[in-house]
Image (cartoon, grey):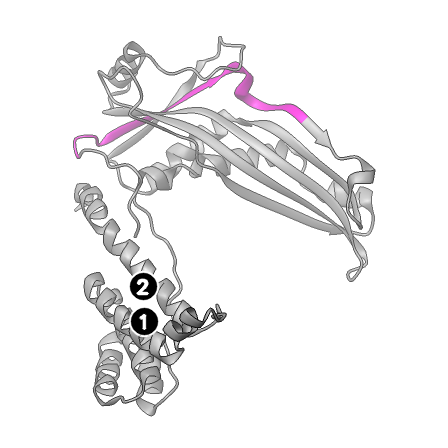
Amino acid sequence: MLPAKVSFPNTLRNVAIVDNTNATSQGNILFNREKEEQKNLKQNVYSKETIYFNGNAKTSAEALAKEIADRNYFEKVIICDSALRTGDYKITRNKLSKEEVNKLISDLGVDFLISLDNVSIKAKKIIRYEPYEQCFKGTIDATVQPTISIYLPQREKPMLTISPQDSIFWEEYAPTILMTNNALIQDTAMVTQASNFGGTIPVNYIIPHWKTANRYIYSNGSINMRNAAIYAREEKWDYAFKLWNESWKSARKNKEKMYLSNNIAVYYEMQDSIEIAIKWEKEAEKYAKATYHIKEKIKAGEYIDNNTNYYKINAYLKDLEERFNDLPSLYIQMQRIQ
């Protein structure tokens, strides 16, 4: 679990999501389209264009509210159905005044507001011929960037404004250019799906979240290591640790020590003992440097293969150190649901 970028006081338990986009953003408004000239296109690329959209603010606001509610981090999440800037017809970035914030918080019965200020979509559409498949391939790669602001009562300015971005992708294959173009998601549906996706993007910035990570466990070298790997796959970590620890005490070669130290680090990470895991992974790094003669190669200016176990161990050590540094923030943020 990773901490959010922002920590909220425990007193802020009820939140309202409001649509603060202006009138030009209240729907699927296309505002620019750029096509590349045929002479600039690469071989096998038949068409390429970049399309800019305002996202569907209503769809994004609903997705934002639903995603926050589904995380069960705040006690109450409500959405204000009314768009606040329906009378604005110029593209501006309006901030809510202190009076507006206080009135909305009072009327909606919440502790603070999250306003959706903008949703922009940049879609790159390419149709190319794929000679191996003997057909045309159409792709749309859309970068979605929502802007949200967090408002607390009695403050003149937002507590925080963020504009994170992420991408969503579609592809289709067909025998002809026309059929490929027709098979690809059309503008209206693309904007709806991208806007829905856009509403979920900021949530990891304001709520702690889970992240999937890869971990390497070495199983070659001895019967003990192979048996321990089976225990690890079955999530019988204590049995695996016992075998790794026994093998480590009797190991003589640097490579064996490297493998076993890494595996023991994974064990301690699974127990949430991150500081001890770091200690063991530093041992693994030490033995990896000796195994692959890293110091000598650096001194001689020789190339170090990025695929060596040294690099994998070094990357894992950095992951563990990052997790350890995140723990104080994560602990504070999770207190509200303990």
- Is 114 within the magenta? no
Check disc 2 and report the residue beneath it: 317
Q: In this view, does 21 lie above or below 218?
A: above
**Numbered tag placed on residue 285 in the rendering:** 1
Q: Is residue 199 above or below residue 324?
A: above
> Reading the chain from its start, which is encountered first: label 1 or label 2?
1
Residue 79 image-quadrant placement: top left
Residue 232 visible here: yes
The x and y percentages for residue 136 are: 78, 51
Q: What kind of residue is marked 1?
A: Glu
Instruction: State the SS at label 2.
Output: helix
The x and y percentages for residue 73 are: 26, 40
Q: Which of 72/294 is in front?
A: 294
List the single residue furthest toward the front. Answer: 300
> In the drawing, does residue 166 fall left or right of residue 263?
right
Q: Which stretch did the figure color magenta?
A: 10-32
Residue 235 visible here: no
The x and y percentages for residue 109 are: 24, 21
